[in-house]
Image (cartoon, rainbow, N blue to C red):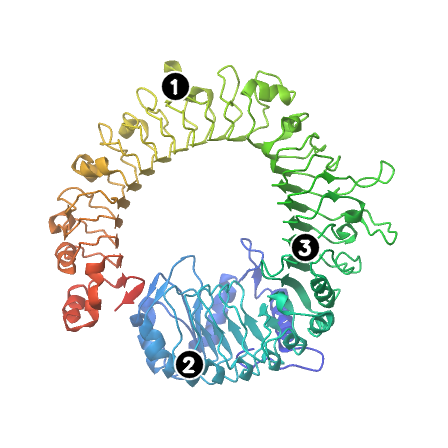
Amino acid sequence: MAEGLLHKTENQTMEEIGDDCFVTLVSRSLFQKSSEDEFSFVMHDLINDLAKFVSGEFTFRLEVDSRSHLNVNKTRHVSYVITEFDKFQKFEALQEATQLRTFLALESSIIFCYMSKTLLRDLLPMLSCLRVLSLSNYENMHELPESIEKITQLRYLDISHTGIRRLPNSLCKLYNLQTLKLSRCEELETLPRDMQKLVNLRHLDLTKTPWIMEMPIHMGKLKCLQTLTKFVVSKHAGCSIRELGELANLRGALSILDLENVESFKDAEGACLRNKMDLKELALNWKAGSNTEISESQRDVLNGLQPHRNLKSLTIIYYMGGSFPNWVGDNSFSYVTSIHLENCKYCCSLPALGQLPSLQNLSIVGFDGIVAVGEEFYRSTTGSSSIKPFGALKFLKFEQMLNWKKWSSFGDENEGGAFHCLEELYIRRCSKLTGDSPIDLPSLGILEITDCPKILASLPRAPAICQLKLINCGEDILRELPIDVTKELRIGGFDMDMGDFLSHMSLPVGGLPSTLKTLEIYNCKMLGLPINLDYSCLEVLKLFSCDSLRSIPMDLLPNVKNLKIERCRNLESLTVAEQHQHDLVALSSLIIKKCPNFVSFPRGGLHATNLGKLKIEKCKSLRSLPDKMNMLLPSLTRFWIKKCRNIETFPEGGLPSNLNELKIKYCQKLIENRMGWSLQNLASLRYLTIMGGSKLDVVTFPEKGLLPTNLIDLEIYEFPNLKLFDKNGFENLTSLKYLYIGKCPKLEYCMLEEGLQHLTSLSFLQICECPLLTKRRWWERRKGKKWRRKFAHIPFKIVDDELIE
């Protein structure tokens, strides 16, 4: 479309013609559906080779090592995959490609990417013939240059997921612009004031732009606009909701915010939502706190915002009316599959959503006025219907219903129940709810009931349930618990021991059902792990705030692969019976966090030959790590230790030789004894993070022989007294590629230079919150030339989020 190859007809838009063309290409196998992503398509290698042959020199895939093959006179379309650091050298050859039509940055799996500012400042104004420009996913891109106006033929501009903060008003001189993508620009605060001049704009994507609080005036003049994902209503002239009424071609998704600025049914009706037949997703948002009492005017406004019956998804947030207008839940909306109603605090009843024949997902959150959910929820009280309520519903969530007491089932035995297709049910923070949930849920696979202490009724019949979560509920709910078929059980807030717990569930005292693979226990002060039970079925065990636990006999858990223990304040030890020391072969991950009285691992060490991850955090009483780690944990590749203030050394023999990643954070005594770490013996260690802490008194780092020569990535944070990088400690780090330095307030750049001159493989240097290193931006001054020359061997240097070239 941006190349002008698609032309609308009387019956089809350019987009529809383009869709038809793509469907034809798929039908002829030029594109194939991706097996990894349902929304993506791929091209067979042979078709790809053919496409490249046919396109010849008109298209070019820009790679770092292929710049010399670019034919600047013939190439019209350039694409490249974004890398972590895209310097100007990568694009230098494009300076002479003045006839370029497409500059397309392709997204990669890298989360944070940085680009050269020279690309924006110097190169883009030279590419005045561009039709397509994509610069998405660059974290350090904070603004577009005013010179963007020189690219007068631009049709497509994508700067989504960048750090952009403002758009120049000169952007509004791009009169041919058809598509402007700004999604996930979470720092963007305003749109250009003259947006109404972009009369050919068809698609404006503002998804996830939280700081845009106001729209430019006269958006209604953009008559071609089809995509407008967000519109903020204002009382100012030219920004009212009536501007939407002028946009007759809107389709896809639309969120309307600040609806408290709409005063009447007539104004709301002026948006003409009922006429927008291609609008599929609609979100209607009032501002929190805009009304402190029931508002009849808001009910009139919501009535005036009735959409077309082709709608598929509806969201209503902070609506302060006392009830919903009749169109919400009307069964004529037969295409609606998803509804989300949130913080409608004054509504005393729910709309008759059960009569929506296609509804699959329903969330109801923050309805303070609801006391009972009954017949009105299932079907309209003003008419009769033969439709079985919620016949298609798969997902149902009730949350934060502070006054909800009763949930009545639908009909009687002759009528049959509702929710026969329901697969997931979540009831959270409904503190007054007593019971009477649906009796029979034959398709239910996931059930969560959290913070509902007054529920008395037993759980519904759910023969297909596989995940069950019960947190802070009454004990009566445990009766007839369908645990015999459950694979994952999460429980919390029950004051009973394991024996009483099992008896409440009518299970034999001897052990857990064989189907149970995952058990998570939260805030059960009395619930322990009795040694007379059989836990051999478990593969995942997570224990949170279980204060009765003093020790965990690891030999009771022979098949547990993932063990996590957190906030068990009385836990003192992990133990293993001598005859079972070699039974921990299944354990692959062990995490112990915030256990202040934990003091010891099993005597003789952990015989866990397959343990790959070990994380220990905030265990202030722990004085030693597991014995013989170097021999007994041969598979350990990741070891993190944080805020264990009494750990002074690693165990005798050091750490396992296969260790790949080591993080040491805020362990002052351990860092002070760093010369005993023996890291040089760890041939597999590639990633090392050391965070010192406010009381650490280290002036010089690292000492000679401290760091292993095979390191690739080194992070040094919060060394408050560090002044000197010892060049002798860096001289053998010939493999180091990434170096991060943060919160070292006394480190000066001359001392930094002294330490880094031996790092010949370093490709990335990042410095943050080091005031003496960033003082007066010395790299931009005369002395900065000397600095740049000395650090020229480092391709990418970032100082406080700025890429330095």
Tell me the CA gap for discs 3 and 1: 52 Å
- Locate residue 153, reporting x and y percent: 48, 84
Question: Tag 1: residue type?
Answer: Val
Q: In this view, does 470 lie above or below 661?
A: above
Q: Which residue is drawn at 85% across and 37% down?
A: 412
Question: Tag 3: residue type?
Answer: Ile
Question: Under tag 1, what secondary structure?
Answer: loop
| Badge number at residue 339 | 3
Question: Under tag 2, what secondary structure?
Answer: helix
The one of 759 and 346 positioned closer to us in this rendering: 346
Tell me the CA gap for discs 3 and 2: 41 Å
- Within 10 Å of disc 1 (Cα), the crowding (few <14, some 14-19, many 20+) is many
Q: In this view, does 513 lie above or below 280?
A: above
| Badge number at residue 576 | 1
Instruction: Work out which quarter of the rendered image holds the N terminus and state it.
Output: bottom right
- Within 10 Å of disc 2 (Cα), the crowding (few <14, some 14-19, many 20+) is many
- Locate residue 165, reporting x and y percent: 42, 69
Can residue 28 be seen from the camera position used here?
no
The one of 237 and 384 positioned closer to us in this rendering: 237
Q: Residue at x 86, y 51 (%)?
A: 385
Along the horizontal axis of the image, is 189 left or right of 388?
A: left
| Badge number at residue 481 | none
Question: Under tag 3, what secondary structure?
Answer: strand
Instruction: Work out which quarter of the rendered image holds the C terminus and state it.
Output: bottom left
Res 467 → quadrant: top right
Res 595 → quadrant: top left
Question: Tag 2: residue type?
Answer: Ile
